[in-house]
Image: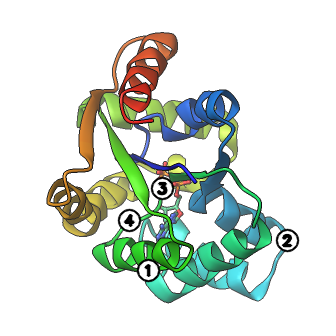
Amino acid sequence: MFNLVLFGPPGSGKGTQSDHLVARYGLKHLSTGNLLRKEIADQTPLGLEAKRYIDAGQLVPDAVVIGMVGAYFDQNPDAAGFLFDGFPRTVAQAEALDELLSQRQTSIARVLALEVTEEELVKRLLNRGKTSGRTDDTDESVIRKRFSVYTQETSPVADYYQNKGKFQSIPGEGTVEGISEALCQAIDAVR
Ligand code: ADP
């Protein structure tokens, strides 16, 4: 298996870039944000619990997210590899992911982090909020809250992978195609 993590703050372009990368490398896209929004749309108990956190700009509890990822993993036993998008978002999630992968004799090959300034991120998210129907993208105070959660809880995940020699930054501003090309070069170098 060949597994990648696409890392970066809210609005850094993980979802946009994921679409191209999964097609090009034949990976399964595992976006915890998408999985949670599906649970919300289906009005499952998990979705109802998650919605409270998402609408407040907070992280959904680790146990909920880790359980959901484990289930998705088990449902895709034949995957050639996964592209993790929006996960792991805490060090506890990163440790759980390592455990999950090692049980299947595999691991993360690379963590690619999209670097975008906060000013540009806020602009992108407010823009996305106009058309996406995502309530967490329409309120600037919720967006700012997500950034502070990112700094406090998610940034340490970068150090976690840096210490394993797996972390690589990619400039996330420019054309979608240009950023995609930079990601592909980084992936081809480790594949
Ligand atoms: P973005 O990266 O633009 O914030 P996502 O779709 O990745 O969008 O996530 C939306 C929201 O879903 C997050 O603000 C958070 O509340 C919740 N969420 C997504 N992934 C996780 C995760 N791995 N752990 C905890 N909460 C998560």
Helix, strand or loop at mark 1: helix
Helix, strand or loop at mark 3: loop
- Place of residue 51 in the rendered image (x, y in percent of width and height, measured from the top left): 62, 74
Q: Earlier in the sequence, mark 2 or mark 4?
A: 2
Residue at mark 1 to residue at mark 4: CA–CA distance? 15 Å
> Do tag 1 and tag 4 residues touch (Cβ < 8 Å)?
no
Quadrant housing the C terminus: top left
Q: Ligand 1 closer than 8 Å to the CB at disc 4?
A: yes
Residue at mark 4 to residue at mark 3: CA–CA distance? 6 Å
Question: Which residue is drawn at the image coordinates 65% and 27% (left, top)?
Answer: 24
Q: Which of marks 1 and 4 is in front?
A: 1
Q: Name the residue under label 1.
A: 99
- Place of residue 153 in the rendered image (x, y in percent of width and height, measured from the top left): 26, 69
Question: Which residue is drawn at the image coordinates 65% and 49% (left, top)?
Answer: 29
Residue neighbourhood size for the residue with mark 3, other residues' Cα within 10 Å, grouped as few (<14), some (14–19), many (≥20): many
Q: Name the residue under label 4.
A: 89
Q: Which quarter of the picture shows residue 79?
A: bottom right
Q: Mark 2 points at which residue?
A: 42
